[in-house]
Image: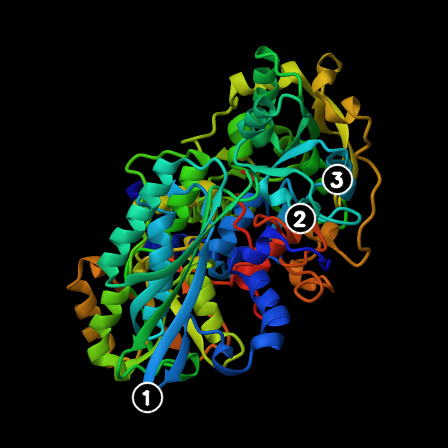
Amino acid sequence: MKYIEGFRDADAARFLHDKLAATGEELAREGRTVRVMEVCGSHTMAIARFGVRGMLPDTVSLLSGPGCPVCVTDAAYIDAAIELAEREIIIATFGDMMRVPGSRETLAQLRAAGAEVEVCYSPEGALVLARNNPEREVVFLGIGFETTTAPVVSLVHTAQAQGVRNLSVLTAFKLVPPALDALIADVEVQIDAFLCPAHVSAIIGSEAYRPIVEQHSIPCAVAGFEPLDILYGVQVLAEMLAQDKPALVNHYARVVRPEGNLAAKTLIDAYLEPVDAGWRGLGELPRSGLGLRERWSAYDAAKRFSVSTRGGSFDPRCRCGDVLKGKIIPPQCPIFGKVCTPDNPVGACMVSSEGSCAAYYRYSRTD
Amino acid sequence: MTTRKILLGHGGGGRLSRDLIAQEILPRFGEGPLAGLPDGALLEFGGQKLVFSTDSFVVHPLEFPGGNIGELAVHGTVNDIAVSGGKPLWLSLAAVLEEGLDLALYRRVLDSVKAAARECGVQVVTGDTKVVARGQCDGVYLNTAGIGVSIEGFELSQGAVRAGDQVLVSGTLGEHGMAVMAAREGIAIAGGVVSDTAGVQRLVQAAAPFAAGVRFMRDPTRGGAAAVLGEIVEDTSIGILLDEQAIPFSPGARAIAEMLGLDLLHVASEGRMILISAPECSAKILAAWKALPEGENAGVIGRVSEDAGRVILTTAIGGRRLVDIPRGELLPRIC
């Protein structure tokens, strides 16, 4: 584990902190802020887990963006999954979807009531379930950003190649760049720079953020998930702000290429096409999701079983949306930590360990 | 969102489990030795101080790297008695078997029970066997109950823990949980990870000469070290400050935890113990532990603070974060 230790070095962290503090102060003297949004949920988790937020100077703030796939999943999508499970269909899902609140209940509660909901560690688990239960229908809950989209598409590809006909996917794939566009367009959201996702960028490539830098002059840095990756990314972004030279930098070149993963992109394009998508908190965003192309509708659970993933309702006091947009931090939500806890999540941001609210609750609760 | 059914998370050893016990068990049985929910009940009988404990075992898969459900069933009860300050002597063994179970596998399980009992110095003295129809249990469920005698000198209680005390751990944390999860999901990593399942009775014996300075002992099973430490400080005026760099983890367990996005402080061990000692005794206990093979990776991982009700971890990179009691089921993250 020497490899990882190198990215968690306390001396290097202190050095970056001091540089960041100097830059932050310089900007503060000009009345300028350093508000950096970490877009990705895994960044949010890493920031909380390593205590990075507390290591930042007062002049620099990190806002958690809409990058946790579980958090942006609509209640209506859960309702659709529950409807399928109630029709005796086997539901296969990533673990943290189990506790996402739908309009009425969660998949964990449904499982306790007797429905077959199976937790998979990888989409391949759904293929195994389909093979082992040839007389049953299996639906995989295909949520996630570009990172998880690729393996789920590869599941469809394998099912198709092997003639597995009792497996389909309930899709709610999301795309990162349209979400960033929506955040920039919202006048109430004040973001000075983006810390861009690590693994999503491994698929889509760092060049995907070029339009944001060029059209909106907002600095973007692709960074890895280790604490030094994050501190360095934030420090470089602050420097770009201080020099008024917004640019796109890739500090995760050990994994991310400018063009991304071409094999994955080709496969995604063969099976999926852009669709309008509903985001919890952000609402409906045009062409911000991916759905199966007409040609593959046999694998599209929504079409195959005629269920809708639109509509749905949830607790109006929940301010998940404002948290996802970076308008408030989780403790500013009136129900955070009181009504809404990891045991009894109201909003999806409290469900996934990657969610902003769960990360805040677990790692930095101070009340 | 309240629940009217038992969820899998109610068995996870975290907050959901505790709530269930607080709401359903304590109101009915919470008077007498069960109060305070120790790992084992301290009972006085005929001038003798006895320790009595029980545990059920439902692990899947039944066999995993480093052990099987048989030795787990011995270690679980032996350890509950040991960390209650007892010397375990006798065990009961009850088995619920599923129709169609491979007899060769059941023999391996029973052989492991026998070997583990001998290693721990306990005798299986009574038992029961039931068979249920296929599909009504998962191969083998075991229950053990055990009786031990209280070791002279230990006066253990959470209430005795005070600021300045030292937090000791007897070895690397979380290997059992990671070995089982890896076996369940077919995750293979270089070097592998092997369950730590073992008896801790010799560690307890080694600490006995310093019993007057030992405030509290517990084995971090379900819920991990985070649950044990969180429960000590919850609703008290003390806290615990941990030093991440001092906490022993094995490279294999770390690799799997990193991959699945789990916190090893939330993951079960089945052969480790946490001990809180007065500051003047910690070095002596540590030296005694390190002289045993099962204590070679032991260390002082933190100290009791005055930060009321909170367990705080100083991270290797120099940050600080709260270590919370896990909620329920450990669910791997999506990406």
Find out whether the residues at labels 3 and 1 contact each other: C-beta distance under 8 Å: no
Which residue has dot 2 on it? A112
Q: Residues within 10 Å of mark 3 (few under 14, many from 20)?
A: many
Q: Quadrant of the N terminus of chain A?
A: top left
Say what amino acid the circle numbered 3 marks.
Ile
Chain on which label 3 sits: A
Chain on which label 2 sits: A
Of the numbered discs in the image, which one, if any, rests on residue A82?
3
Say what amino acid the circle numbered 1 marks.
Gly
- Residue found at the very far bottom of the displayed protein: B47
Which residue has dot 1 on it? B47
Q: Position of residue A51 (x, y in %)?
A: 47, 58
SS class, disc 2: helix
Say what amino acid the circle numbered 2 marks.
Ala
Find out whether the residues at labels 2 and 1 contact each other: C-beta distance under 8 Å: no
Please identify the quarter of the rendering in which residue A126 is found.
Answer: top right
Disc on the earlier residue, 2 or 3: 3
Q: Position of residue A218 (x, y in %)?
A: 62, 40
Q: Is residue B124 above or below residue B42?
A: above
Distance in Å between CA atoms under marks 3 and 1 = 59 Å
* Front: mark 2 or 1: 1
Of the numbered discs in the image, which one, if any, rests on residue A172?
none
Q: Please check whether the numbered discs 2 and 1 fall on a single chain.
A: no
On the question of residue B312 being in view, the answer is: no
Relative placement, left or right, of A271 versus B114 is: right
Find out whether the residues at labels 2 and 3 contact each other: C-beta distance under 8 Å: no
Q: Nearer the viewer, residue B172 or A223?
A: B172
* Front: mark 2 or 3: 2
Q: Nearer the viewer, residue A51 or A267?
A: A267
